[in-house]
Image (cartoon, grey):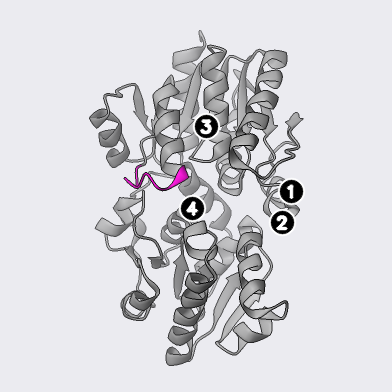
Amino acid sequence: MAQIFTIIGARPQFIKAAAMTRAIADSPFWNQTILHTGQHYDPLLSDIFFEELNIPKPTFSLKLITSDRSERMVEMRKGIKEALETSSPDVVLVYGDTDSTLAGAQVAHELRIPLIHIEAGLRSFDLNMPEEINRIETDKLSTLLVAPTRTAIANLESEGLFHSLLSGDIMHDNALHFTKDLHCIKTSSILVTMHRPSNVDSPERLHSWIDAVGEFCLDNRISAVFPVHPRTEKGLIKIFGKDFKSTLMNQRIKAIKPVGYIELLKLIKSSSLVITDSGGVQKESYSCGTASVVIRHNTEWVELLESGHSVLCPEPSDLMELATSKHSQIIDTSDNLYGDGNASVHILKEISKRFISL
């Protein structure tokens, strides 16, 4: 059997890998070897996803020593190279736009192993985002570019990259797969997720976002559920102290620990609105039929904006008006923006055609 070597290291990649893992498990042609770079090392952001999504335990797990980004990239490349030389796979599979993605792409290119990039062609056109650099560089190094949307295909072609496949989105696959048996009742409560450095590393900006969310909740007499990312928690402690949860409750914001993927889907599906800076949660909101306000200046998922399923909110001062416009909006997903829920099957069939003799 041929071998796919999958490189993952952060929450969105675990979720994407779950969809591909189901397809690989049903294939008579492929085995999968998984390497976890250790980029997300917190059990709340890693272990729980492997358990609830039935992803096989990684064959290789790196333990990163430094928190410096450039040094971590060196560590990841070294560990990935050793694992690839040990495994000698037929293809390397990377997902999305994290440092793990780029490190895997660089090593696969160096070792001349065919590289498949799932979620290729996404662009925010903001070179201040490390994720944007990672996407662009990974696409340049890839043998097969698996693009989730026609917009992504157009972006690749504008950059002179034509070796692409229009697949649909595998995170949409997962959201449909894991919510098909969930029976959630819509409530007036909203969901908030926030973790991007541009929003949470500055105490002043994070405070402004909290105040804006609190104002919206108090004005509408509703509550917000706020799973707090470890990075965001550090900022909240700086602002409000260790008892920040009590302070947030005064603004009708219920801060909770990070939740697993399925629990997050339940929260999205039952909420009347999602406020987020996460690329994955934007799409999961669409898949669950819930409108979203994206607290960023840009998004790579432009289809959600064009269709009116989500709206950009660049500044805290904009939140009241934009959240009011989207609150309790009904989302019609019959437009199939991200495919039919079988993207992973389509992708594996194409990989098989291109990289093994059937």
Q: Where is residue 348 drawn, in percent x and y?
A: 50, 26
* Position above or below: 115 against 196: above
226 or 288: which is nearer to us? 226
Give the Cα distance between marks 3 and 1: 22 Å
Asked whether disc 3 touches disc 4, contact meaning CB atoms under 8 Å apart, the reply is no
Q: Residue at left 61%, top 76%?
A: 239
Residue visible at 67% across and 73% down?
237
Residue at the spot 39% in from the left edge and 25% down from the top edge: 140
The residue that label 3 is drawn on is: 102
Amino acid at the residue labelled 1: Asp
Circle 1 residue: 47
The nearer-to-camera label among 3 and 4 is: 3
Label 4: which residue?
280
Q: Is residue 51 left or right of residue 210?
A: right
- Point out the tag, 2 or 3, that comes first from the N-terminus: 2
Element class at badge 4? helix
Assess whether mark 1 and mark 2 are in contact (beta carbons under 8 angstroms): yes
Residue pointed to by mark 2: 44
Q: Is residue 97 left or right of residue 100?
A: left
Q: What range is drawn magenta here?
A: 123-130
What is the CA distance from the residue labelled 3 to the residue labelled 4?
18 Å
Q: Amino acid at mark 2?
A: Leu
SS for callout 1:
helix
Q: In x, y percent, where is residue 214?
A: 50, 84
Q: Amino acid at mark 3?
A: Leu
